[in-house]
Image: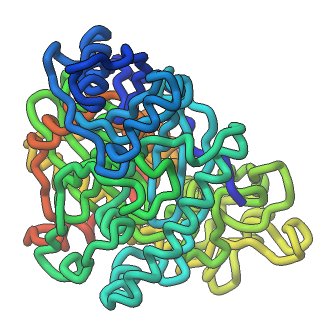
Amino acid sequence: ERKAGLTAGRRGLAGFRLDPLVRKVAVRLERPQEGAAGDWERLGAAVAAALARDGRDAPGTPLAPPPLDVLRGLPGLLRAHGFAVTAVVGEGRVLAVEPGDTSGTLLGVALDIGTTTLAASLIDLNTGAEEAALSAPNPQAVHGADLMSRLAYGFSPAGREELRRVLLEALNGLIADLCRRAGRRPGDIYAAAVVGNTAMHHLFLGLEVQQLGLAPYVPAATSPLVLAAPACGLALHPAALVYCLPLLGGFVGSDLAGVLLATRLWEQEGPRLVVDLGTNGELLLGDREGLLACSAPAGPAFEGGAIAAGMAAAPGAIQALRLEEDVRLDVIGGVRPAGLCGSGLVAAAAALLRAGLLDPSGRLRDNPDLPEPLRARLAPDASAFVLARPEEAAGGRAVSLTQLDVRQLQLAKGAVRAGAEILLARRGIAPADLEEVLLAGTFGNYIREEDALAIGLLPPVPAARVRPVGNAAAAGALLALASREARRALEEAVRRVEHVPLAALPEFQEVFLRSTFFPAPGDRAA
């Protein structure tokens, strides 16, 4: 089921000037007299002058001529419409010319291509206002829930093309649904901005991915790209441009570049740690003194994958819980529980740790000091803890947290925590020196800060310093789409980011193994 998506995009332009990737300029030319300049020269001069008047371009900045097919039709178009037309302009070039004044219709779409979830937001590029937002599952998941499995499927040309085909079908369907919701047409969309991890970036563009499966994991391209929408396979206006945000290196993708832009970390006083939680966890540490980034292979546990009763954050998913005399569940939609989403998984582990039903090694165990109703939920062999009995659950099927689920969570949280520890050590600071820990991503928006700290997912800081920032990757895509100033600021900031390849570090395995353990009761920050 498709759900509302990029709520972070409603925060506006964060101080950047509205100056979108593609603009429209309506002009009315004088009818030519004997000896007049050519149709294109007069149109180009009029459009350039209009752009200079509103301060978006320097006076005298020339525009590149339109594509040949547009130039061929220009004389007839001008004369058929009394020399009143609208030029569609992007990247210093006239991309299309439309009859009359169509400047009031100028839409853009921001796309966040996640390994598990796709999110899209439709905005009015004339005002910066968001008109609609949706999300949907990434259909590539049938070919592998984790990145390496999916990349392996894409090593062959046929596999790569299949992954791209199903992705584009889903993205174009999401765009069509957005337009229906907003009463618009895909042909009204003249620009797109795209973020995603390195694998999703490459599969979206149809780039070779074999080199991503082998050390040193070098991307085909890391620079920001401005491409034609038809070449990308997006069903937008034929002249639309697509801006792919830059990659930060290796498996640190353009989604983290979007987070960097949304948080403007390069301007901050005092170090902040950004943790983007998902199938491919990404971390960013820094401030105006410097920026470090890394990728942590968390796997699908945080999004309900590889968990016995795992499911997406949808109605019926346990999203939080507490242990009193018995289990008290918080279920999305207020219905009977059907499974466990990522935030519920973390909440369950945190609650069991606090109750002494889970030890720091990750082993489920009995605690004779607890009320009998709670102890009765632990399987006799301590292989599972029942969160909802069959008579309490949807469909009459029990929802349990199993010992294997706990191990999956330990692997996921261990990878993220190890990345954080290594970045902090690289910068030479302790957790206490952090001004804030920012949780990005949809999962990061729903997890309770106290639960994340209790299981040791995050460095030990006071809970008041942990702040969710929503889908910051998508918010960054919106900023890049709507503001040339934002794009330039990001591209400058990206050049300052040092990519730390965790897998190549000799200390990584030791730090990772240590990070899989849960904090002992006296070591918990919350």
Viewer-proximal residue, 432 or 26?
26
Quadrant for the N terminus in the image = bottom right
Q: Nearer the viewer, residue 497 or 34?
A: 34
In the image, taking residue 194 as reference, residue 138 lies left or right, namely right
User: Residue at position x 52%, y 27% from top?
Assistant: 81
* Count of numbered circles in the view: 0
**Residue name at image x 36 percent, y 62 percent:** 231
Colour scheme of the rendered structure: rainbow
- Residue 345 percent location from the top left of the image: 58, 61
Residue at 30% from the left image edge and 87% from the top image edge: 155
The relative height of residue 249 versus residue 484 in the rendered view (above or below) is: below
Q: Is residue 397 above or below residue 336?
A: below
- The residue located at (21%, 31%) in the rendering is 63
On the image, the x and y values in percent for residue 341 come to 62, 61
Q: Quadrant of residue 481?
A: top left
Query: Residue extending furthest right?
Result: 391
Q: Indicate the position of residue 304 as horizontal and vertical percent values.
A: 58, 67
Q: Position of residue 417 (x, y in %)?
A: 31, 57
Looking at the image, residue 154 sits to the left or right of residue 186; the answer is left
Which residue extends farthest front? 34
Is residue 273 visible in this depiction of the protein? no
